[in-house]
């Protein structure tokens, strides 16, 4: 009996925690988790990464101009053209005294020529055009990398917006459920008071109409929750299983706001899209230098070795040729147009950079004051929510005591319902505008996005 009792005590001590752990729901998805998933699975991230890889590949292609060119050729020809036959026999080192006869020279027999050739060339000097092309390609690759960083920030902002939208929709659904329960309680109270002769039938009808409105609001709120989940799935780039649909609840946060001048200075220094334009400006400047180098002389070497045979496996003669070449374009009409286009590109990049600076200042200013307004609205909404909650309690007590009408109670209930909605709307807007300011200043990252929650 003691053994059985000990076993039962041990079972009760061990099994419940094990069962609890087996039935424990998965941990909620934090905002930082959602951003990390988005950066891994969203197709837009893959598109931006492909653009960066293409720019790197172009930079590597330009570098191949520094390497020599080497080719292998295998040709097979047959003919009786006198010049062809004469040259073929000579290269195959099969020329004999009989081949000098007039009949053999004028009407030769068809000859085969199996040619194996190795040839190559190497540009030794091109007035530094290749080096400047390489610098241009490297700057464009860095520009693509900066554009990829800005694309990441856009994904992070989209994820923050979608995540917060789900939290707000869930809060709205909770409020709709609470308001529905309140409306049901008001209807029940109005029916009881009407049956007891303490109120008129109009109060009961008004309570029923109020209940119908709250039921409709609940249906709309539940639909908004499903839409918000779908938008979050689109933002992170992967479906969310029903058992994983747990998020940290929407809560009030205090976000610091740096002075506007400091925020603008930070944006002008950190915004990746501004870095893109700066690198584009440098690349266009390098492209102009490369276009000017194209007018200079080029020095290259070339050479070839070949074997000529009358059959594929036969023997024959071999020869080689090597040389150097100096080339100078005396009528560079097309190169002048390329230089003109490069100068236009530089002017365009400079104008785009100036316009971008103005837009950045506007973006930061708009986001800064929107955040200040959202923070002030949150303070007002919080105070209003507390006041209307107390007002609803007083109105309900007065209605139960016969000192207020159903209309007064429903009006106070509407005020409290709107104040609750406005409060959570202010909490939601406060988080979004803080994320907008981070995005405008170029400081939004996966880590900073997680700190919004």
Image (tube, rainbow, N blue to C red):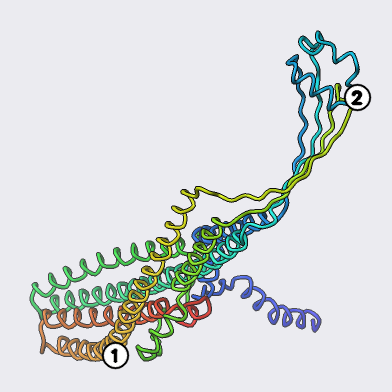
Q: Residue at x 21, y 87 (%)?
A: 392
Q: Secondary structure at mark 1?
A: helix
Task: Kindly identify which residue carries mark 1.
Answer: 379
Q: Is residue 293 left or right of residue 362?
A: right
Identify the residue under disc 2: 314
Image quadrant holding the C terminus, namely: bottom left
The crowd level at tag 2 (other Cα within 10 Å; few <14, some 14-19, many 20+) is few
User: Is residue 290 at all visible to an observer of this figure?
Assistant: yes
Q: Is residue 285 above or below residue 303?
A: below
Residue 423 is left or right of residue 267, and the answer is left
When the figure is inspected, residue 185 is found, relative to residue 320, above or below; the finding is: below
Residue 165's place in the image compared with 257, above or below, is above
- Residue 189 or residue 316, whichever sits in front: 316
Could you tell me which quadrant the N terminus lies in? bottom right
Residue at 76%, 28% in the rendered image: 75
Tell me residue 365's x, y (percent): 31, 82
Which residue is located at x 81 percent, y 81 percent?
Answer: 3
């Amino acid at each position: 009996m003691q053994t059985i009792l000990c076993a039962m005590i041990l079972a009760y001590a061990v099994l419940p925690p094990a069962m609890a752990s087996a039935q424990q729901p998965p941990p909620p998805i934090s905002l930082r988790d959602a951003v990390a998933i988005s950066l891994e699975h969203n197709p837009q991230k893959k598109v931006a990464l492909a653009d960066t890889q293409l720019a790197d590949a172009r930079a590597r292609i330009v570098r191949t101009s520094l390497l020599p060119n080497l080719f292998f050729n295998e040709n097979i020809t047959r003919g009786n053209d006198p010049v062809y036959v004469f040259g073929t026999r000579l290269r195959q080192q099969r020329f004999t005294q009989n081949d000098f006869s007039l009949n053999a020279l004028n009407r030769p027999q068809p000859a085969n020529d199996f040619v194996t050739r190795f040839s190559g060339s190497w540009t030794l000097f091109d007035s530094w055009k290749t080096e400047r092309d390489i610098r241009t390609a490297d700057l464009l690759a860095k520009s693509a990398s900066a554009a990829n960083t800005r694309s990441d920030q856009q994904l992070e902002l989209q994820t923050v917006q979608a995540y917060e939208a789900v939290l707000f929709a869930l809060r709205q659904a909770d409020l709709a459920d609470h308001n529905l329960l309140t409306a049901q309680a008001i209807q029940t109270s109005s029916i009881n008071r009407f049956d007891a002769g303490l109120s008129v039938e109009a109060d009961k009808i008004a309570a029923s109409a109020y209940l119908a409105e709250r039921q409709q609001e609940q249906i709309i709120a539940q639909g908004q929750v499903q839409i918000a989940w779908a938008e979050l799935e689109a933002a992170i780039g992967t479906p969310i299983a029903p058992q994983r649909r747990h998020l940290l609840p929407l809560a009030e946060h205090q976000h610091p706001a740096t002075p506007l001048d400091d925020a603008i200075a930070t944006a002008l220094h950190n915004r990746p899209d501004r870095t893109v334009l700066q690198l584009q400006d440098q690349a266009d400047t390098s492209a102009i230098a490369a276009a000017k180098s194209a007018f200079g002389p080029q020095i290259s070497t070339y050479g070839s070795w070949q074997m000529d045979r009358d059959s594929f496996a036969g023997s024959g003669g071999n020869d080689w040729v090597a040389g150097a070449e100096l080339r100078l374009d005396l009528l560079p009409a097309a190169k002048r147009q390329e230089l003109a286009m490069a100068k236009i590109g530089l002017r365009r990049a400079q104008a785009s950079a100036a316009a971008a600076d103005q837009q950045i200042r506007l973006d930061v200013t708009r986001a800064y004051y929107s955040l200040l307004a959202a923070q002030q609205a949150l303070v007002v909404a919080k105070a209003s929510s507390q006041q209307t909650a107390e007002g609803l309690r007083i109105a309900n007590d007065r209605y139960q005591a016969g000192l207020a009408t159903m209309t007064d109670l429903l009006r106070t209930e509407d005020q409290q319902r709107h104040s609750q909605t406005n409060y959570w709307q202010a909490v939601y807007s406060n988080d979004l505008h803080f994320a907008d300011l981070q995005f405008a200043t170029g400081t939004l990252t996966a880590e900073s996005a997680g700190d919004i929650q």
